[in-house]
Image (cartoon, rainbow, N blue to C red):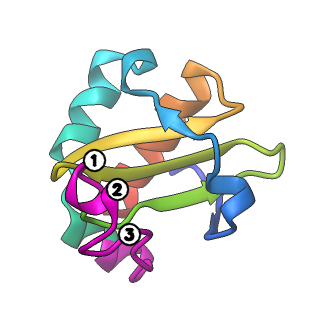
Amino acid sequence: MTVFDYAPTTDWRDKNMTSNLDHILDEEALTIVKSIDVDELERAFGDRPQDYYRGDYEHDVKGYTLPYWYFKSINDEVVGIGFRYGIPRVVGKNVTPERLARFVKLVAQKV
């Protein structure tokens, strides 16, 4: 088993400017992401604070109703799994497709 070498982060500087990266995942990793649910992430990584609440535009209109789990590696990759309109997706910045797929597979081992 490969070591999970990412540290959880809730720092806004890390989370800011991340984007949906589902489109760069290989088919296997994308299938893994789409099968993850919020309860599995909570059990594996603990509760995460909500970024947005009822009444916020992002919650009510843009679909950010569930938390995101963000992680940072030692080389400044930021990756995460979250939900928009209840659909799981992988997000990040400064990460290659290969490293992103590796992250997803490591999360799958944890959940």
Q: Is residue 36 above or below residue 41?
A: above
Q: Residues within 10 Å of mark 1 (few under 14, many from 20)?
A: few
Q: Residue at x 47, y 40 (%)?
A: 91
Amino acid on which disc 3 is placed: Tyr
Q: What amino acid is at disc 2?
A: Glu
Extent of the magenta region: 42-64
The residue singled out by tag 2 in the image is 58
Q: Secondary structure at mark 1?
A: loop
Asked whether the viewer can see residue 4, the reply is no
Q: Name which residue type carries label 1.
A: Lys
Place of residue 8 in the rendered image (x, y in percent of width and height, measured from the top left)? 61, 68
The residue beneath circle 3 is 52
73 up-or-down from 28: above or below: below
SS of the residue under disc 3: loop
Question: Quick check: 96 above or below 70?
Answer: above
Q: Which mark is residue 76?
A: none
Q: Are marks 3 and 2 in contact (CB under 8 Å)?
A: yes
Say which label, 1 or 3, has the lower sequence index. Answer: 3
